[in-house]
């Protein structure tokens, strides 16, 4: 499995993707991405950095089927309703946007898109809400992503939504690799929560 991930990370890097974009594409942390890329570096063969403690999540069987995406988005929308009325659904680019799009339709809510820092070339202080989608000012929002790895992207999304005058009432994700209940006092609702034993 590691050799396949190393090859895929190297292939994506050669296509010009940033470390953050590769991490998002492979559903792993940025640290794991950097480690994978370093494995292809000849200089690094003698100086192995310790392997990161991470899990690669492959949800391609869901992402390649619009009906499965609909079912999963429906479950995520149902989790959201536990927290109250939603005015806007904020999808974290790239992988959270398809879920958010379907959820916004199911919840009869506006759709907004968040561009995380990890996708930006010069990694500024925080991510950004796209101007091409709904304004979130004075709205109750749910933030949607596919996987929580460290929580950094979602935490940034919560803070940016708040600076735009929105009230994040929940975060919904397909998989929570960190095993958390809330971030920045916002409940995290996941379909799958990974908890490490031992």
Image: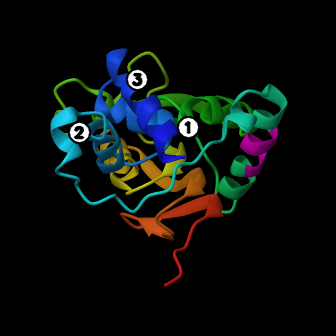
Q: Earlier in the sequence, mark 1 or mark 2?
A: 1
SS class of the residue under badge 3?
helix
Q: Residues within 10 Å of mark 3 (few under 14, many from 20)?
A: some
Q: Residue at x 76, y 50 (%)?
A: 75
Q: Is 51 covered by the magenta stretch?
A: no
Residue at which label 3 appears: 12
SS at mark 2?
loop
Mark 3–mark 1 distance (CA, rounded to whole Å)? 33 Å
How many discs mark residues in the rendered view?
3
Above or below 138: residue 17 = above
Q: CA distance from mark 1 to mark 2?
A: 20 Å
The magenta stretch is 71-75
Counting from the top left corner in percent of width and height, residue 146 is at 56, 44
Q: Residues within 10 Å of mark 2 (few under 14, many from 20)?
A: some
Is residue 136 in sight in this rendering? no
Mark 3 or 1, nearer chain start: 3
Q: CA distance from mark 2 to mark 3?
A: 24 Å
Q: Nearer the viewer, residue 51 or 42?
A: 42
Residue at mark 2: 126
* Residue at image point 79% right, 26% down: 66
Residue 88 - label: 1
Residue reaching furthest to the bottom: 198
Examine the residues drawn in magenta and state their main secondary structure: helix
> Viewer-nearest of labels 3 and 1?
3
Query: Mark 2 or mark 3, which is nearer to you?
Result: 3
Q: Nearer the viewer, residue 145 or 112?
A: 145
The mark found on residue 179 in the picture is none
Q: Which colour scheme appears in the figure?
A: rainbow
């Amino acid at each position: 499995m590691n050799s396949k991930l190393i090859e895929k990370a190297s292939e994506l890097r050669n296509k010009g993707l940033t470390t953050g974009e590769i991490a998002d594409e492979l559903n792993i942390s940025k640290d794991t991405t950097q480690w994978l890329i370093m494995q292809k570096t000849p200089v690094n063969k003698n100086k192995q950095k310790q392997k990161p403690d991470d899990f690669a999540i492959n949800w391609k069987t869901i992402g390649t089927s619009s009906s499965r995406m609909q079912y999963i988005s429906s479950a995520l929308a149902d989790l959201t309703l536990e927290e109250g009325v939603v005015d806007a659904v904020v999808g974290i680019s790239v992988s959270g946007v398809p879920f958010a799009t379907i959820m916004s339709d199911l919840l009869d809510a506006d759709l907004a898109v968040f561009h995380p820092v990890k996708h930006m070339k010069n990694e500024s202080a925080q991510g950004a809400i796209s101007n091409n989608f709904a304004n979130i000012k004075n709205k109750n929002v749910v933030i949607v992503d596919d996987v929580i790895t460290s929580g950094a992207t979602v935490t940034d999304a919560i803070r940016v939504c708040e600076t735009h005058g929105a009230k994040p009432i929940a975060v919904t994700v397909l998989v929570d690799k960190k095993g958390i209940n809330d971030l920045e006092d916002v409940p995290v609702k996941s379909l799958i929560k990974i908890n490490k034993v031992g």
